Structure formats: structure tokens, C-alpha cells
Amino acid sequence: MKIIIGLMVLIILIFIGTSCSKVVVEEIMVEEVVVAAEEVKMEEELAVEEVKIEEEIMVEEEVVAEEVMNEEVKIDLEDSLSLYNDPVLKYLGWEKRDILDLFGEPDIQDSIGGPGGEFLYYEKENISFIFAGFDEVVNNLDLFPGAKVLGIEVGMTFGQIEEIWGEPFYRGWDDYIGSYTIIYWLGEIREEEMLAEIEMYFDASADDAPTEFLGIRWKKYWW
């Protein structure tokens, strides 16, 4: 009888011990899950914070780069020699055969202006090379939306252009061309003759609308 009672007590103790072990194991597992979840949450929060920091750094770098570029462009506008280092303005004075050698056959080729006047239009580059007279030398350029010169892209508004180039020579309605225009004089200025080495004028349908055209007139060609 004592043996049976002893065995029953032993069985009860084993059952209790097993149940306790299960409870302990379950509690440990729950704690591990909670800890893992907290670690994942912390990692996600750190990742989000890192992204924010990277974005802030990128924005700051873009602002600094834009300010530097704008300052460089403004300096270039005052320096007659540096103007012709621009990838577009450098073509002023080029001969027709050199343009054809570099760009190939134009999309449109036609006469313009007086005797011997001609233009070559290249759609991919959004540019027309204009030749005056019979010497076949580029003296004017026409640029269309997407084309860039001295940090300006045709398609910007007058306000955006002024932010980069500063105050223009003129801004307002032009009765002759029938649109709003903004004009800049670059390089050497002959105030008595009202001439500039290079004259640039942008056209737009409204004062705050995107520009649709940029005419570049190399006045020095006639000096």
C-alpha cells in the first residue's frame, strides 16, 4: 500500500514538474518573440531615419551645387572670353561645312533672311544654325524646348531664368514678335550704339509661362 501511494506521489510530482517546464519554456519563447519583434522595429526605425538623413544630405548638396552653378554662370555672363566655352555658344563663327561634318545632314535646310541666308535645323539637338550672307558662317542660333545654354534650359519661365542670370535688359510684351519676351545682353556692350556682343531673347505665351524659344544673335559678327 505504501509503495502504491509512493508511486502516485512520484507520478504527480513528475506531472507537476513537466507542466512547470512547459510553462517556463513557453514564457521564454514568448519573451524571445517579443525581443525579436522589438529588434525588428528598432531596425526599421533606424532604416527610416537613415533614409531621412540621406535625403536631407542630398537636398543640401543639390542646393549647394545649384548655388555654385548659378554663381559660375553669372560670372561667365560678365566674361566675354568664357562665353565661347559654352557647348552651344562655341558654334558661333563655325563654318557650314564644319557643322555638317559634326552633325551630319539636317532634318530641315532652307533659306532665310537676305541673299545667301540659310539655316540648318537638327531636331534631336533642338537647335537651328543660321548663316548670314555668302560666307556660310554661323552668326545666329535658334534653340527650342529642351536645349540648354549657360545653365538655362529652354522651357524655364522668365522667373527661373532671372534667378540664374539676374536682371535682364528687358522683360515684357513685344509687339514685333507678338509674344512676351525677356532679353539679355552678354559679353561686350556698346551702350552708345545699343549693341551687345551676344543678344539672347526668350519668347513665351505669357509672362509666367514656360519659354518656347530662344534666339541667340551674335551681333559681333557685324562689328
Image (cartoon, rainbow, N blue to C red):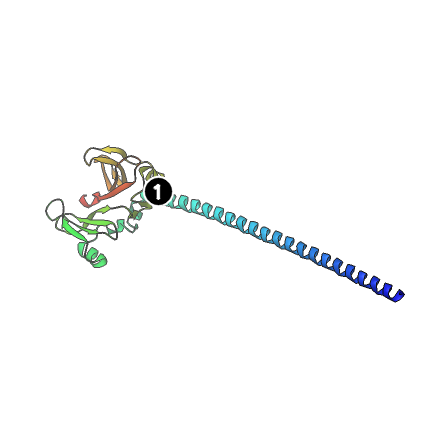
Q: Position of residue 179 (x, y in %)?
A: 23, 36
Question: Is 199 on the left or on the right of 132, as rendered?
Answer: right
Q: Residue at x 19, y 46 (%)?
A: 221
Residue 11 at x, y percent in the picture: 80, 63
The answer to whether residue 78 of the structure is visible from this angle is: no
Relative to 155, 98 lies left or right? left
Dot 1 falls on a residue whose secondary structure is helix
Q: 137 or 190: nearer the eye?
A: 137
Q: Is residue 103 left or right of residue 33?
A: left
User: Seen from this angle, which residue lies furthest front?
Assistant: 1
- At a point 21% along the width and 49% down the height, the residue shown is 128
Image quarter of residue 205: top left
Circle 1 crowding by C-alpha within 10 Å: few under 14, some 14–19, many from 20: some
**Residue identified by numbered label 1:** 74
State the residue in front, 204 or 143.
Answer: 204
Is any atom of residue 141 visible in this view?
yes
For the N terminus, the image quarter is bottom right
